[in-house]
Image (tube, rainbow, N blue to C red):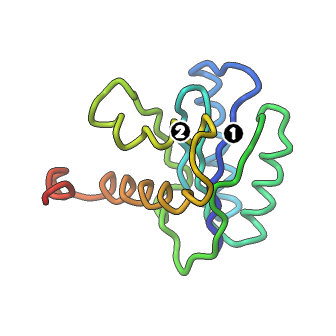
Amino acid sequence: MRQLLYVSNPTSELTPSALDKILTASRANNALLGITGLLLHIDGGFLQMLEGEEIAVRTLYTRIAADRRHSDPRTLLDREIPVRVFADWSMGFECPNLNDPETAGMFGVVRSAVHDRLAPGTGRIVAMMLQTFYRVQNSDLPLNLYYAG
């Protein structure tokens, strides 16, 4: 099983309608390819985690990196994993509001990644943050249990 985390910036500004079309197409294509993951849109840029069989993930990322609608795609993490982390999401999507104190702290690192301000090797930290986000979103437990000391 392969897990690949990358960031990129669109070559032109995206409208909410264009984002919806991207998400709809991504979910359909990913389901066909057996790929799961998460797409975040922050400050006009994207951070995406893809996971699935190695050939499918590499083929999809090669297509994304060559797509003229993307500029400056950068791989933050590319690793083998024993099991899927985002098993229930053909493509989870979030467009966090960084003016909200609850999301600004968690997703501030994504903003840094989109703007190429992360130190090399921090992809594992970003992946851990995304895994925590996924667990919280898919849990019936109250949110405060995740933040108890």
Question: In which quadrant will I find the C terminus?
Answer: bottom left
- Is 81 drawn above or below residue 41 in the view shown? below
Say few, some or many: other residues with alpha carbon within 10 Å of mark 2 (under 14 / 14 to 19 / 20 or more). some
What x and y, as percent, mark residue 106? 37, 44
How many discs appear?
2
Could you tell me how far apart the alpha carbons at marks 2 and 1 are, in whole angstroms? Answer: 12 Å
Residue depicted at x 60% and y 21%: 17
Which residue, given by chain and number where applicable, does mark 2 sit on?
Answer: 112
**Amino acid of disc 1:** Ser
What x and y, as percent, mark residue 84? 52, 71
Front residue of 90 and 85: 85
Quadrant housing residue 113: top right
On the picture, is 114 further left or further right than 140?
right
Front residue of 100 and 50: 100
Residue depicted at x 75% and y 65%: 56
Residue depicted at x 67% and y 19%: 13
Front label number (2 vs 1): 2
Which residue, given by chain and number where applicable, does mark 1 sit on?
Answer: 8
Q: Residue furthest front?
A: 119
Front residue of 138 and 127: 127
Say few, some or many: other residues with alpha carbon within 10 Å of mark 1 (under 14 / 14 to 19 / 20 or more). many
What x and y, as percent, mark residue 51? 61, 64
Residue depicted at x 80% and y 46%: 65
